[in-house]
Structure formats: C-alpha cells, structure tokens
Image (spheres, rainbow, N blue to C red):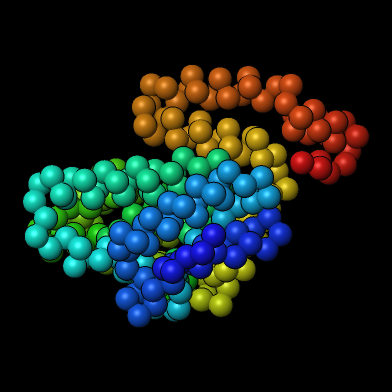
C-alpha cells in the first residue's frame, strides 16, 4: 500500500507509522487522516503485525494540530461532518484497536495531534514535548474526542483548565498528570516505545485484545465495564492462548504465544 502523507514500515511484528509532513509540522489534513485510516485498519487485520508505534517525522512535532485551512468557510453541517468522520474513521479505530498502539510524542502535540496521541493506548513523550488543546483560540472546541479523552486521563478540573485557557503543558507536567506514561530523552523515545511493545508481544495477543475491549467498555459506559470484563474473562477459557499459558505455568517455562 502506497502512501503520500505517512510512512509505514514493518520490522518483525512491530509496525511503525510515521506522519510524514515535517514541513507542515505533521499537521492533519483530510488526506493524512484518510491514509491513517487505511494504515491502521490494515494493521489491525494483519496477523503478522503485533503492535504499532505512531510518531511524527522530525524532531519538532508529533502533530502540531489539524490543517486549519480546511476549516475555512465551513458551517455547522461541514464542521460536524469533519468531527464525525475523523472520530469514527481514525481516532475511535485506534482507541478500539485489537493491538497495542503507542504514541511516541516527539515534540508538539497540539489540538488534533494531542487528540491523536490520546486515542493511542500508551503515550511516551520526549523531554522537549509540549502538549495542549488550543482550539478555543480559534473559536472552536476539540472535535476529535479531546474533551472526553483528556477528562478521562487527567480529570474534569484539569481538562477544563487546559481546554479553556488553551495553555500548553510540558512533558514533565503531562507525566505528573498521567497524560503520558513515560518521559525520556529524545534519542530514547523510539527505543522506549519498542521496549514496551516488545514486552507486550510476549503476552497473549488474545488476552491483550480482550483487555483493551474491557477497559474501553467501562470508559464508554461505566455500568457495562464489569459485565464486559466478566464476559471477556470467560471467553479466554478454552482458547489456544489460555491452554498454552497454563501449560507454560505448570511446566515452569515461558509461554509461546
């Protein structure tokens, strides 16, 4: 599959998806979002891919936001359609993916860029990263799930402060808030993401996918979180991964999933 705005490389069971618009600070336009949709949809269906690392080209930006030029002249219906299409075809697909996705935040993650990182299952930031949702400075609010995912990650008060002031925060503050999982030197960003993904790849892929579904269920509807966990727990029994995992435990060896 050929892409113009992103680069996709698979090494072993790891796939690297890089937003390749460095001169535009990797801003998300409709073509980039369409390519991200195609790349992630294919990766989640490909049995050879075990996990995905998402990053931006260069050292300045992960994604510096949406391409605002595309917003010019839009009315209510146009704006609503952009948000709906982006959420359903990219951001929600990543969040609900059956394989772990790590965002390697290598610089600015603003607006749609931060929303893209928040859709990923784990976030790692370089120490020079800056994050924020500046939409209110344009007379907008976050439209790609930002009001919901930021609140889930940092709490209502801090989410409202970040959204209403439009202030950026440092990587260190993002770590303190729980917005990112780790902060590392820039040269260590991809290696840290690889370290975490490679550890996950030694675990049961069926169980990893089930865990993602159970966690997400509780975020969408807290009343369904526990029931989904119970259902997914039950489904694990009798699977090849469960049989291998228990056998490995009993035989005091590492499982081969």
Q: Is residue 248 left or right of residue 46?
A: right
Q: Is residue 228 left or right of residue 129?
A: right
Q: Quadrant of residue 175?
A: bottom left
Q: Is residue 11 left or right of residue 36?
A: right
**Image quadrant in which the N terminus is located:** bottom right
Residue at the limit of the structure toward the front, as seen here: 2
Q: Quadrant of residue 130?
A: bottom left
Q: Nearer the viewer, residue 179 or 116?
A: 116
Q: Which percent across, then down, holds residue 256?
A: 81, 42
Q: Is residue 229 above or below residue 189?
A: above
Q: Nearer the viewer, residue 154 or 71?
A: 71
Q: Does residue 137 appear anywhere in the picture?
A: yes
Q: In the image, what residue occupies the spot 60% across and 59% down?
A: 15
Q: Which percent across, then down, holds residue 126?
A: 47, 71
Q: In the image, what residue occupies the spot 47% across and 65% down?
A: 3
Q: Which percent across, then down, holds residue 122?
A: 50, 52
Q: Is residue 248 left or right of residue 10?
A: right
Q: Does residue 114 appear anywhere in the picture?
A: no
Q: In the image, what residue occupies the spot 35% across and 80% down?
A: 23
Residue at the limit of the structure toward the right, as seen here: 251
Q: Quadrant of residue 207?
A: top right
Q: Is residue 98 above or below residue 196?
A: above
Q: Which percent across, then down, holds residue 206?
A: 65, 35
Q: In the image, what residue occupies the spot 76% across and 29% down?
A: 240
């Amino acid at each position: 599959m050929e892409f113009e705005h992103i680069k996709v490389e698979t090494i072993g069971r790891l796939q690297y998806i890089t937003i390749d618009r460095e001169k535009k600070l990797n801003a998300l336009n409709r073509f980039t979002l369409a390519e991200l949709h195609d790349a992630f949809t294919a990766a989640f269906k490909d049995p050879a891919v075990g996990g995905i690392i998402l990053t931006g080209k260069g050292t300045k930006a992960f994604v510096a936001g949406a391409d605002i030029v595309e917003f010019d002249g839009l009315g209510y219906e146009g704006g609503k359609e952009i948000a709906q299409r982006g959420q359903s075809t990219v951001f929600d697909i990543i969040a609900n993916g059956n394989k772990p996705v790590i965002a390697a935040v290598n610089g600015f993650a603003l607006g749609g860029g931060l929303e893209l990182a928040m859709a990923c299952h784990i976030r790692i930031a370089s120490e020079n990263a800056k994050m924020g949702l500046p939409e209110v400075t344009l007379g907008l609010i976050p439209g790609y799930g930002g009001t919901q995912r930021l609140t889930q990650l940092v709490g209502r008060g801090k989410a409202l402060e970040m959204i209403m002031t439009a202030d950026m925060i440092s990587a260190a503050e993002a770590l303190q808030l729980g917005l990112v999982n780790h902060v590392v030197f820039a040269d260590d960003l991809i290696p840290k993401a690889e370290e975490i993904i490679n550890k996950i790849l030694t675990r049961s892929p069926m169980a990893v996918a089930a865990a993602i579904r159970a966690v997400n269920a509780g975020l969408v509807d807290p009343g369904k979180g526990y029931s989904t966990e119970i259902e997914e727990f039950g489904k694990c029994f009798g699977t090849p991964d469960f049989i291998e995992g228990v056998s490995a435990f009993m035989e005091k060896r590492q499982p081969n999933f």
